[in-house]
Amino acid sequence: MTAAQARRRFAAAHVARLATVDARGHPHLVPIVFALANDTIYSVVDAKPKRTTQLRRLQNVTSNPWASVLVDHYDDADWSALWWVRADGAGRVLELADAEARIAVRLLAERHPQQRATGPVLAIDVERWSGWSARPA
């Protein structure tokens, strides 16, 4: 799968898994919804119930910016339809007042109208798109 094919499949997905690493090297993996603009993935702290808006994923990219985001398709009946795409890059935390964060929140609201931004935006600048598909491209 080419990087362009991987990016197209990624952009069409609705949910992903975000992997970050804390300052001690411990992995942290969570599902996210996202918006993609060029080669930047955006996710936001939203209004779903949480103990805090200072989420571990934000703390992690502050101490170690490297992150991976994975989307995939699984079909129990047809394994020839299986595929996955991974985006690897560096994360940044944006405050809601930042111009880029406001754009990200608008993109996220267009893609996920039920989502309400309440905290910082996580931006991941993708440096590498990779993927695999059971079916040839």
Image (cartoon, rainbow, N blue to C red):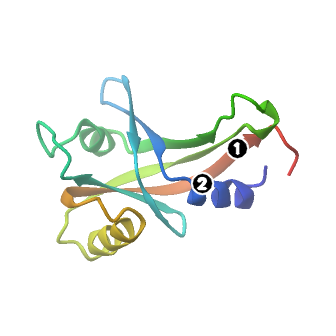
Q: Earlier in the sequence, mark 1 or mark 2?
A: 2
Q: Label 1, secondary structure: give it.
A: strand
Position of residue 44 measured from the top left corner of the image (x, y, whole percent): 29, 55
Q: Is residue 103 left or right of residue 15?
A: left
Whether 45 is drawn above or below 4: the answer is above
- Horizontal arrangement in the rendering, residue 26 relative to residue 126 (left or right): left
Cβ atoms under marks 1 and 2 closer than 8 Å: yes
Give the amino acid at mark 1. Answer: Gly
Q: Is residue 39 left or right of residue 75?
A: left
Q: Nearer the viewer, mark 1 or mark 2?
A: 2
Residue 19 picture quarter: top left
Please give the name of the residue rendered at 24% of the width and 52% of the height, measured from the top-left corner: 45
Q: Which residue is mark 2?
A: 10
The foreground one among 80 and 102 is 80
The residue sitting at 74% across, 29% down in the picture is 77
Disc assigned to residue 131: 1
- Left or right: 129 with respect to 29? right
Relative to residue 111, is residue 58 depicted above or below?
A: above
Q: Residue at x 22, y 61 (%)?
A: 117
Crowding near pointer 2: few (<14 within 10 Å), some, many (20+)?
Answer: many
- Which label belongs to residue 111? none
Percent coordinates x, y for residue 4 in the rendering: 72, 61
Amino acid at pointer 2: Phe
